[in-house]
Amino acid sequence: MRTILILGAGRSASSLIQYLLNKSTSENLHLVIADLSLELAQKKTQNHPNATAIQLDIANIENRQKEIQKASIVISMLPAHLHIEIALDCIAFQKHLVTASYISPKMQELNNLAIENGLIFMNEIGLDPGIDHMSAMKVIDEIREKGGKMIQFESFCGGLVAPESDTNLWNYKFSWNPRNVVLAGQGGVSKFIQEGKYKYIPYNKLFRRTEFLEVEGYGRFEGYANRDSLKYRSIYGLDAIQTMYRGTLRRVGYSKAWDMLVQLGMTDDSYTMENSEHMSYRDFTNSFLAYHPTDSVELKLRHYLKIDQDDVIWDKFVELDLFNATKKVGIANASPAQILEKILAEKWALQPEDKDMIVMYHKFGYEINGEKKQIDSTMVCIGEDQTYTAMAKTVGLPLAMATLHILNGTITTPGVQLPIQKEVYLPILKELESFGVVFHEKNVPYMGYNPNNVGS
């Protein structure tokens, strides 16, 4: 049998494993599911005869290499910084590797070695990055093939809560790593190009520069800029494009309220707070406000952020329990971001009956025969439950499909890569449709960049 080694059995691995188990008999597969938690790995095998759960500490080099050596192909669902050691082992033992993570500089340095050894190191083959690349390149290639020239590309993606499970004022619940949500946009400036002009948004202004989008059947969303929208220009073959913008989607109103948490300093992860384990949520909020002998924390915050008492943003803050004097942080030497993450994790957790939702929206502006045209492409995916979430489905299924195509020799190009070649994206996008991941493309009047704003 062909052995697939899956490193990491966390939340995003559920749909990946389910897909491969369903294919295991017809495709002659045996899955080895490795995790630091044997219990978690065993749970993901579902007692299937074609799956084995093992406990594996990645730091144990001997055990790690022994398992990689036995595999036909390796899937790494580990945190991105751990991929490089796995990749080096895969080169040493001549194994293909598949990950959903962004290609790091260290991973890219292995490109020549991978090519020399005839190995495929497929990265960025999850949701975002992944499905965004594939669905974008499909339309971009079609526009080029009919003689069009790309002049605008905008791409937005959001992991959200499904409408039927949307029960809080923020219209948001966690469907992936809460820490990444709290730290979103930090560590650098957001940059993009708009009508031929380079634009930069510092973190402290990021959530006040949004674009509105309408998705048929699902209402209105807002998008804020990702860190670097320019890195894929060359990869997509769009070096001469006039507008290139990649963003994150939220429901309208989220960003304005989140910006106030940023302005307070609650998302800062650069220092630790004294006596944090004994601090109440009210103490935490008060620590960012000036001292006043008589004014309450509530009054000081409203004055500082200029929030009217009848403003829904005020209700959002109250809903988060930010003024609760009895709830304790309970984390020693915590940064503000860590404390905020704990507070939000309580309020924004997906409940057992909740469903999540993925929304993706692309805008393609192009010129053909002297005429400017636009195609809008949208995809909405609703999760089944807390195990088979939309996030797990859209991250895991492309990974699983790519793995099988590599094993079966239908993806053949060696090297460190992302899924922008037709041999990769055409069959995977086609198969994803049978799992409800469907893009709806429509021709619309060309609008140029961001119809909400004008000027240069």
Image (cartoon, rainbow, N blue to C red):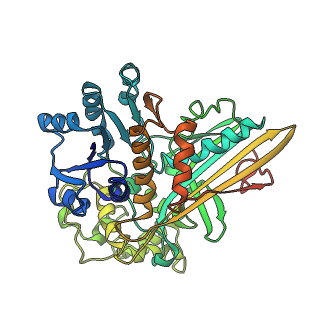
Q: Position of residue 363 (x, y in %)?
A: 67, 50
Q: Is residue 65 left or right of residue 235?
A: left
Q: Position of residue 302 (x, y in %)?
A: 47, 71
Viewer-proximal residue among 196 and 157: 157
At 63% from the left and 31% from the top, the residue drawn is 237
Q: Position of residue 362 (x, y in %)?
A: 63, 51
Q: Position of residue 343 (x, y in %)?
A: 32, 67
Does residue 65 appear anywhere in the picture?
A: yes
At 37% from the left and 76% from the top, the residue drawn is 296
Q: Is residue 350 left or right of residue 47?
A: right
Q: Hey, which residue is sitting farthest bottom in the picture?
A: 310
Counting the numbered discs, the total is 0
Quarter location, residue 108: top left
Does residue 384 sit above or below 167 in this rendering?
Answer: above
Viewer-proximal residue among 252 and 246: 246
At 43% from the left and 51% from the top, the residue drawn is 184
